[in-house]
Structure formats: structure tokens, C-alpha cells
């Protein structure tokens, strides 16, 4: 399972970056099944080279990317700049991407973080530091599968009123086990 969130002011280049990532994943999908961590690292190296190649053509200040691969019950992920990932686990909200996004002129994926995702865990990916605007209780309510769609809409409306500089983008994933 591929998890990908790209937030970028240049919609055309953002779409091109997204297609490049998907092409790289599809090209290496057979090899990833054998050793996902190693091949995910290789994918990130290729993306870092790609960003160096196109650095003269674009301004990357507003680029943020979360990219992750879930294999069985393990999540491998990396982030660029302002991408946030929260693991809702056993009544706690953990910012699992805290400190990962480096602010460099040329965006670079710095390292891979890996961890197990349990049966009742929920992963929430955002281009916004949600804990600046929501309580942990709000996040658990939003993750509740029974009211998820309605509650997510209410929270998105709240965030869009609070955050003016960028539109909030959220991905909510319940462990598919």
C-alpha cells in the first residue's frame, strides 16, 4: 500500500512530481515485495537526485511530501518539509514525523522511519500541524469510523477557517488488517 501526500503551490509541477513517484514505485514494485525497506530507500535516493536536477526550474519553498509504504503491518515512511503524520494508538496521539522534514533549499528526504501499525491503530497524515488547531479528543473523534465522514467534514471546515495560508489536506487510514 502506497501512501502519498503532496502539497505544493505549483499544481502542474506537483502533479509531475506525483507521477514521477508513482512511476518509480511501479517500476520497482516487484523488487519492493522482497525487501521493501531497501527498495524504499532506493526510491528516496532517486527522488533526491530528481529534485537536484529540477532545482533551477522551480521554487521549492512550499513543497511538502509524505511518502510511505505499508507492507503487512509495517509502515516505512519519509517526509519533506511540512508534512505531518500522527499515529493514534492506545488513546494517545503521537506525531511520528516530528523533526523529520529538513528545511533545505533543495528538498531532500533525509531518512526513513519504520514502525509497526497495530490492529486498532489509525494513521493521520496532514500538511498542517493539526495539534496547533485540534485537541487529541478531536482527532480521535475524527478517526471514529462510525462518524468519520461527517466529522471529517466539520474538522476540515474548522481548519480552513483557521488556516489561511494553505488549504488543509488530510489522509486518514485505518489499519486494514
Image: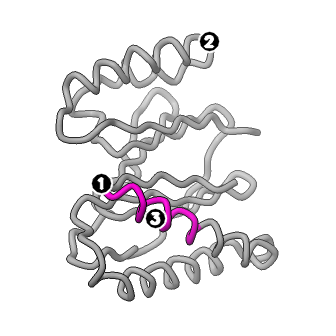
Label 2 Cα neighbours within 10 Å, binned few <14 / some 14-19 / many ≥20: few
Q: Residues within 10 Å of mark 3 (few under 14, many from 20)?
A: many
Q: Nearer the viewer, mark 1 or mark 3?
A: 1
Identify the residue position indicated by label 2 in the image.
146
Q: Is residue 108 magenta?
A: no
Image quadrant where one finds the C terminus: top right
Nearer the viewer's eye, disc 2 or disc 1? 1
Do the residues under discs 2 and 3 have CB atoms within 8 angstroms?
Answer: no
How far apart, in angstroms, are the residues tagged by discs 1 and 3? 20 Å
Q: Which residue is mark 3?
A: 78
Q: Secondary structure at mark 3?
A: strand
Q: Which residue lies under the disc numbered 1?
A: 9
The N terminus lies in quadrant: bottom right
Residue segment shown in magenta: 9-21
Q: Secondary structure at mark 2?
A: loop
Where is residue 71 drawn, in percent x and y?
A: 71, 58
Q: Earlier in the sequence, mark 2 or mark 1?
A: 1
Q: Is residue 94 left or right of residue 174?
A: left
Do tag 2 and tag 1 residues touch (Cβ < 8 Å)? no
Tell me, yes or no, whether the highlighted magenta stretch contains residue 18. yes
Residue pictured at 27% horizontal, 79% vertical: 106
Quadrant of the rendered structure where residue 160 is? top left
Amino acid at each position: 500500500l502506497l501512501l502519498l501526500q503532496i502539497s505544493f503551490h505549483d499544481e502542474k509541477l506537483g502533479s509531475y512530481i506525483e507521477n514521477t513517484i508513482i512511476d518509480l514505485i511501479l517500476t520497482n514494485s516487484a523488487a519492493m515485495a522482497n525487501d521493501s525497506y531497501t527498495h524504499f530507500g532506493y526510491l528516496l535516493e532517486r527522488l533526491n537526485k530528481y529534485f537536484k536536477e529540477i532545482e533551477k526550474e522551480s521554487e521549492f519553498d512550499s513543497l511538502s511530501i509524505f511518502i510511505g509504504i505499508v507492507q503487512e503491518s509495517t509502515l516505512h515512511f519519509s517526509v519533506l518539509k511540512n508534512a505531518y503524520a500522527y499515529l493514534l494508538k492506545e488513546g494517545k496521539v503521537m506525531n511520528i514525523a516530528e523533526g523529520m522534514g529538513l528545511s533545505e533549499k533543495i528538498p531532500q528526504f533525509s531518512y526513513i522511519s519504520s514502525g509497526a501499525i497495530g490492529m486498532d491503530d489509525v494513521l493521520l497524515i496532514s500538511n498542517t500541524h493539526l495539534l496547533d488547531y485540534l485537541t487529541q479528543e478531536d482527532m480521535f473523534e475524527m478517526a471514529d469510523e462510525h462518524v468519520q465522514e461527517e466529522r471529517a467534514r466539520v474538522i476540515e471546515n474548522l481548519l480552513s477557517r483557521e488556516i489561511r495560508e494553505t488549504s488543509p489536506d488530510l489522509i486518514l487510514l485505518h489499519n486494514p488488517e
